[in-house]
Image (tube, coloured by chain):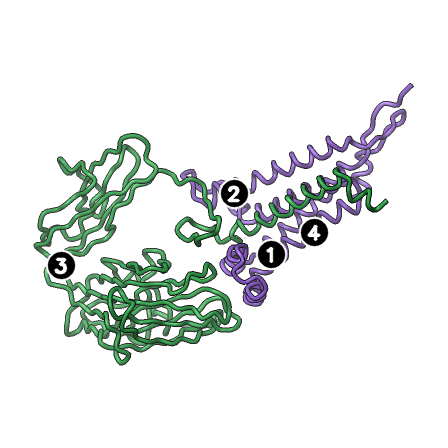
């Protein structure tokens, strides 16, 4: 009796259908991303199926923000995606913050190069139009004085101070740093191993360069800041991720440059992450220190501002107890004055 | 509620009741489930992936997919399991529990433990990554819990109604 029912094809078919329904149902839950918006293409770990709907036609301008010294040339390049047919470009320029644009005669190529810029070009916006409906914008800041540069590619231990960063929601991780003579991009680099604390799914660390003090009172008000670093994730597990951002420390407060652009995820090969140009005070958000008063500028870029130091911030995600290794090289901050 | 549904399907005098044919019942459940599920997919297309028309579902879109997932897969499972009160209720209860477990797993109190347990049990198995990311990156929402319960309840009521005997003319 039992044997006969086990061999019943209808019963088997029903079981297979049921299994399919359960698998599809579970995949639907996990694939939804849990309300986090689902996986985005750029965040899709290798090996995972993170297929997203086909992207619409788009155009981007690189660089979106550029800071240039008087007398230098500036170029922008347009990149299109999913544009059908012949791609046509028309570059325009605005000198009123983007309210109105005037076509630049003959500027119909993929790349626009402005001749050596001068202070009259400061604040200019260029726009590329692809067809009638696709537009992208690039911003230009021009400085009359060379930027003050802080950089480190060797990472002597005495030049940096690192602090695991915790709050009520996310306990501070453990963090170990060491400078390795080889394996960087190229040569020496700084390796960090961040171990996620119990009760947490992430760990944050701030590193400040002790040799990077900029004092607006003696060196002048800050107009904008350029930031660059090369970063690498030192393991290939799809379960872990490391994000990076520029850190600014002033008057007992710490800020990271995350307001204007989303965080970049480190990959398993050296790449320029978190490179940002023309960062203004509004592009930084407070992550530690006293709350900002109504009458305060946070951070303060004015000529009466307190000295500031720079560094970087790392945020690793994973599972409690995970020791996540990541590296940094070619860290560079350029302070541009008015 | 059962009484109400019973009255709606009550057999008039001069008629006798018969079960809906199995194929018809299954097609009906799958069709309703697919229709419900497609509205959930629509939320992702319109409201969460940012199509040019902008959000369509508004605040409802935050919880709708959770509710229709529980509803649709309860119906699919009930279609696969066949007729019977225990199967109907089992299908709805199971999907309600599964959805609730995944949602609760995203709560800050539970997610580290669940993720650690999963990581320890499954290691780098291909399915582990997406599930861990779901737990760690997902957002717990009480509204989702409510939507899941309502979705499973709606499926249960629908099944009770559809599995009532349908009236037909008595033979002479």
**Numbered circle sitting on residue B102:** 1
Calculate the distance from the C-alpha at mark 2 to the C-alpha at mark 3: 47 Å
Calculate the distance from the C-alpha at mark 3 to the C-alpha at mark 4: 65 Å
* Mark whose residue sits in front, 3 or 1: 1
Image x and y of residue A306, in percent: 23, 74
Asked whether the residues under marks 3 and 1 belong to the same chain, the reply is: no
**Numbered circle sitting on residue A143:** 3
Q: Quadrant of residue A91?
A: top left
* Mark whose residue sits in front, 3 or 4: 4
Q: Secondary structure under badge 1? A: helix
| Total marks in image | 4
Q: Residues within 10 Å of mark 3 (few under 14, many from 20)?
A: many
Q: Which of the chains bears the disc numbered 4?
A: B
Q: Which of the chains bears the disc numbered 1?
A: B
Evaluate whether residue A261 shows in this view: yes
Calculate the distance from the C-alpha at mark 2 to the C-alpha at mark 1: 20 Å
Identify whether B166 is placed above or below A335: above
Tell me, what hue is chain B? Answer: purple
- Taking the image as shown, residue B13 lies to the left or right of residue B138, namely right
Q: Secondary structure under badge 4? A: helix
Tell me, what hue is chain A? Answer: green
Image marks 2 and 4: residues in contact by CB distance under 8 Å: no
Which residue in the protein does label 4 denote?
B94
Q: Which of the chains bears the disc numbered 3?
A: A
**Quarter occupied by the N terminus of chain A:** top right
């Amino acid at each position: 009796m039992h044997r006969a029912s086990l061999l019943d094809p209808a019963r088997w078919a029903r079981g297979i259908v049921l299994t399919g329904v359960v698998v599809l149902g579970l995949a639907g839950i996990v694939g939804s991303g849990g309300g986090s918006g689902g996986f985005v293409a750029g965040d899709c770990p290798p090996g995972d199926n993170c297929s997203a709907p086909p992207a619409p036609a788009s155009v981007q301008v690189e660089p979106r923000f550029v800071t240039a010294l008087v007398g230098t040339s500036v170029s922008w390049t347009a990149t299109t995606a999913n544009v059908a047919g012949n791609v046509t470009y028309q570059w325009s320029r605005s000198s009123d913050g983007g309210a109105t644009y005037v076509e630049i005669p003959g500027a119909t190529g993929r790349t626009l190069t402005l001749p050596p810029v001068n202070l009259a070009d400061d604040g200019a916006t260029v726009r590329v139009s692809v067809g009638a409906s696709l537009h992208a914008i690039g911003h230009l800041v021009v400085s009359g004085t060379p930027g003050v540069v802080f950089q480190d590619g060797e990472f002597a231990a005495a030049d940096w101070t690192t602090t695991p960063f915790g709050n009520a929601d996310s306990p501070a991780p453990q963090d170990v740093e060491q400078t390795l003579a080889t394996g960087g991009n190229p040569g020496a680099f700084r390796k960090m191993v961040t171990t996620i604390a119990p009760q947490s799914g992430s760990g944050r660390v701030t590193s400040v360069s002790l040799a990077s003090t900029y004092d607006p009172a003696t060196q002048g008000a800050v107009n904008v800041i350029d930031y660059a670093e090369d970063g690498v994730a030192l393991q290939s597990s799809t379960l872990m991720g490391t994000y990076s951002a520029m850190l600014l420390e002033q008057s007992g407060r710490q800020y990271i440059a995350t307001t204007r652009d989303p965080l970049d995820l480190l990959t398993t090969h050296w790449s320029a992450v978190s490179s940002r140009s023309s960062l203004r005070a509004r592009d930084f958000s407070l992550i530690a220190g006293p709350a900002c008063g109504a009458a305060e500028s946070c951070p303060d870029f004015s000529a009466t501002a307190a000295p500031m130091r720079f560094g970087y911030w790392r945020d690793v995600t994973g599972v409690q107890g995970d020791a996540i290794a990541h590296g940094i090289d070619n860290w560079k901050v350029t302070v541009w004055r008015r | 509620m059962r009484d109400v549904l019973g009255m709606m399907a009550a057999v008039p005098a001069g008629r006798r009741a018969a079960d809906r044919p199995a194929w018809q019942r299954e097609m009906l459940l799958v069709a309703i489930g697919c229709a419900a599920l497609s509205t959930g997919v629509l939320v992702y297309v319109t409201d969460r992936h940012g199509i040019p028309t902008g959000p369509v579902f508004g605040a409802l879109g935050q919880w709708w997919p959770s509710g229709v997932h529980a509803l649709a897969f309860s119906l699919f499972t009930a279609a696969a399991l066949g007729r019977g009160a225990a199967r109907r209720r089992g299908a709805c209860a199971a999907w309600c529990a599964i959805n609730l477990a995944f949602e609760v797993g995203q709560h800050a109190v539970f997610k580290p433990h669940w993720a650690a347990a999963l990581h320890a049990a499954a290691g780098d198995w291909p399915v582990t990554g997406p599930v861990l990311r779901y737990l760690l990156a997902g957002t717990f929402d009480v509204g989702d819990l409510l939507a899941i319960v309502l979705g499973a309840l709606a499926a249960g009521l629908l099944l009770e109604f559809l599995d009532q005997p349908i009236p037909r003319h008595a033979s002479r």
